[in-house]
Image: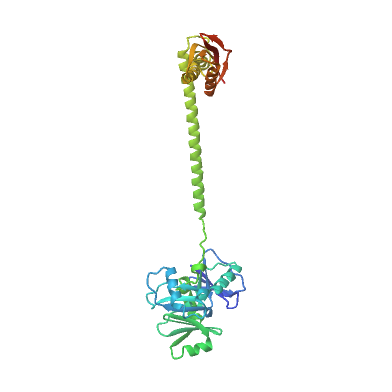
Amino acid sequence: MNLVLILLAGEGGLESWLRLVDGEVVERASGSEPLRLDAEDRLVAIAPGDSVTLRWLDLEAGLTPAQAAAAARLLLADQSAEPIGELHVAIGREVPEEPGRCVALVSAAAMADWLDRCAAAGLEPAVIVPEPLLLPVPNDGLVRYDRGALSLFRGEAEAFAMEADTAELVVAGRRVTAIDSSLLEPGLAALAGDPLLDLRQGPFARRRQLRLDPALLRRLAMLAAALLLVTLAIQVAAILRYTLGADALEAETRQVAAHALPRNPGVTNPSGELADRLVELRGGGAGYDATAAALFAAVKAIPNVELNGLSFSTDGSLRATLAADNQAVLDDVARRVEASGFATELGPPRNGGGRRVADLTVRPQ
């Protein structure tokens, strides 16, 4: 894996960058020089050591990152000069060889500023590592690396950065081994490639970008096309089946009509002539059965009405002779038949045996 390390300047911008291939530095430049990233490059931002406070805390094993961060906030609330609510807390991975777990405290504003600087340069670091954690861990005492006026220190379960003059007072009496770039750079690939602690956690965690494999896209496109073709084939097959079924039904209708009609060599449209024959048998309009049923229902529902005569015409009209006590009853029968969906015509009334008699004609509407 190729690594590109970007050193964030203390006062803004990017201080410098270097590229590592197979663990060796193959390219280095100042932050003002353009940086070209290849697809296989992993971008690591290095946070200034004096902007990050590192502590090793005795945290319970097996905690989730969120639980570990909450526990660390409680333990460090009284040790921070700034309000703990304004600080970003990052938790390092568990290392059996070290007592405690590495915890970083850094201003949330500083984290946002570092990410903004990278974004302004068109860069998106995969991780942000505190600078002191890039020093190797000594077997005894401390390791010191001087970078300008700032000195970086690393020991077992401790790492910090401070000005050189102040550092002499803090580490007085302890064994300190100074190293230079020739001893530092060979170990950068391991310490930056798999860092003990990544500051990009919680609200500053890197958002995963969805990257689609072109081969996968092609397979999905082929699958969608195949699914579309299968769906179209099913629709075409259904249409053909319905068409063939309709043709078969028409042929069967013709065959039944040919057997049902009298054997007449002049018959050219058996289905049509069979329909005409059915009309003759059933009657025109709604047919005798439906028309007579509406009339019979009306007569049955109204008391003192007699049906004295009934005739049905091929045009679908039904003529009935009704006898009732008065004209209002005859009108009521006509209204009830009309309510069944037929048109009625009530003829003029006449006397018959002391009752009112009228002819009622019922037709389809």
Q: How many marks?
A: 0
Q: Position of residue 170 (x, y in %)?
A: 48, 88
Q: Is residue 143 visible?
A: yes
Q: Quadrant of residue 351?
A: top right
Depth order, front residue of 279/344: 344
Q: Is residue 77 above or below residue 276?
A: below
Q: Position of residue 175 (x, y in %)?
A: 43, 88
Which sits in the foreground, 277 or 214? 277
Q: Residue at x 49, y 52 (%)?
A: 216
Left or right: 138 as drawn, with respect to 275: left
**Which residue of the protein is positioned furthest toward the front in this rendering?**
354
Residue 341, compared with residue 136, is above or below; it is: above
Viewer-nearest residue: 319 or 102: 319
Q: Is residue 315 depicted above or below 211 in this figure? A: above
Locate residue 4, reporting x and y percent.
53, 70
Relative to 67, is 284 on the left or the right? right
> Looking at the rendering, in which quadrant would you find the C terminus?
top right
At horizontal 45% and vertical 86% (from top left) the residue drawn is 177
Q: Is residue 136 above or below residue 263?
A: below
How was this image coloured? rainbow
Residue at left offset 49%, top offset 37%: 233
Instruction: Decide if residue 6 is in sight here.
Output: no
Q: Position of residue 38 (x, y in %)?
A: 55, 65
